[in-house]
Image: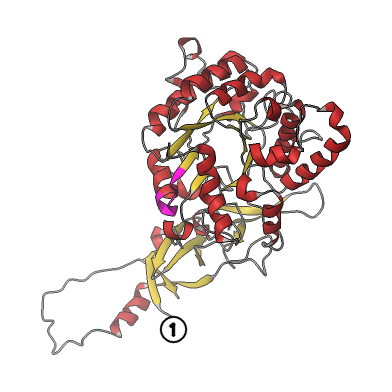
Amino acid sequence: MTTRHEVCPAEELTPGERRIVEVGNLAIGVFNIDGEYYALNNVCPHQLAPLCEGRITGTVTSESVGEYDWEKNGQIVQCPWHHWEFDITTGESVFNPHKVRTRTFDVEVESKSDRDEQVSCYGTSLQGDEPPVQTYDVEIEEDIIVLYI
Amino acid sequence: MSSQGPKGAEAVGLTIDTDVHQTRASDEEIEQYLPKRYQSIGVELPGRMYNNPGGVLREDVQNEDGTPAGSTPENIQTHLFDKFGIDYGILTGDILSLSVLPNRDYAHELARAYNELLVDKWLSADERFLGSVVVAPQNPKGAAELIREYGSHPQNKQVLMNSVSRGGYGHPYYWPIYEAAEEMDLPMALHPSNQGAGMSEPPNAVGYPSNYFARHNAMPMLHIGQLNSLMSEGVFAEFPTLDWVFIECGFTWVPMMMWRMDKDWKGLRQQVPWLKKAPSKYIIENTYYTTQPIAEPERPEQLEQIFEMMHADKTLMFSSDYPHWDNDHPEYGLPKMSESLRKRIMYENAEELYKVSE
């Protein structure tokens, strides 16, 4: 069953940044790449090192010997142990994308209104017209990054 | 923050890590121990010349104040010793590149300053830290002095030199070093650093590779060359109780050299008449190898055959290389093997060589 986990306000994770969160037994790296959010299991399939704590970088391809083409800038994380490269958007390794990969998770940005709707599904309905205690209007402008696991 | 942690000390069992790089937080740490005549120079070492795009230190274990991984006792205690249940770590430091400096006196004083820092900052901090007396091999007389001076510290367990040298280490020019080590009952150890830089020989037998990838692949050649030199020049015959540790340059090549040397010895023995037994016998009795970077063959179980061929129950010792980028996991790095062999590699071989509890 999918469960919902709030990571942090979206403004706290700016483009190019990452955050490691623990959800139950899992450690998950949440990344912001140019305003899009991605989440990877923080475990490298090689020696189970904390993959998501490595360098965020790009990768190099080549059309022919002696040529270098810089690609996927900011879309690659290199495991801090042994430097294996993984595409943050897919969890696939660069050197063997089909066989060597780490798990990905769904990540969404939910606005205040989304959250209010969800919150309103729970709790107790007020009785009568008057609120039972004095209340204040609170504006929550921020969006929330949410993981679905 | 770690993800899936290890199962802990119980899963790994008794462990001696034979390659742990304590790292200076700043050059000033070394400079404070330099003699006055070198205070104005400070620490002046050649660059690596070959660059790793991802850096050399693990980025997940940097200190919060920005100082490098491995630069405080706490960093190594937390991220290596306590996390994985390591019982002892052999410190191999970060200054072996001094051996490629042409100035023999300056290199020697750098080595002395390093050893002073080792005792002051590290050996005093935790009895799990075991030291290596670093020497400048281009200054054999000075090296012998340092061995006799710092080798008496009970936590210093070996003499360490760079794997790259001017000519092979078998040359009698270097023998005063071995005489002192044998006298102090300490093994000699070799670990590569800055091969190709300064006045060192090229990193492999066909000269200078173009990049870090090729240079890193070629590291076994350094130790193949040194083992060949030590064997042929008669170091194992001249210093029969002196053991040698070959760190971080692989071990899968050891059977190849055992067989090749034995075969050549049978027909070319006249050139090395001082070898009283087959070279492989000296290798099994006088040399040790460390596991990292562990070989990862297509079928991991193939390594078991290599272990058998090289008598790993006597010659192989676990190493992590913490906190370097290619360090191996104490629990998940090695392939499956018998429990008795695992104990030999993780602890017993090193325990017997270094006499850690003495």
> Residue A149's image quarter?
bottom left
The structure residue drawn at horizontal position 61% and vertical position 39%, both measured from the top left corner, is: B247
Residue B176 horizontal/vertical position (percent): 62, 18
> Residue B122's image quarter?
top left
On what subunit does the disc labeled 1 rest? A
Residues A33 and B80: in front is B80
Q: Is residue B259 shown left or right of residue B354?
A: right
Classify mark 1: residues with Cα within 10 Å, few (<14), some (14-19) or many (20+): few
Residue B333 horizontal/vertical position (percent): 57, 56
Q: Which residue is mark 1?
A: A1
Amino acid under disc 1: Met
| Span colored in magenta | B82-88
The structure residue drawn at horizontal position 55% and vertical position 45%, both measured from the top left corner, is: B349
The structure residue drawn at horizontal position 40% and vertical position 65%, both measured from the top left corner, is: A22
| Residue A143 showing in the rendered view | no
The structure residue drawn at horizontal position 48% and vertical position 50%, both measured from the top left corner, is: B15
Residues B116 and B230: in front is B230
Quarter of the image for the C terminus of chain B: give it.
top left
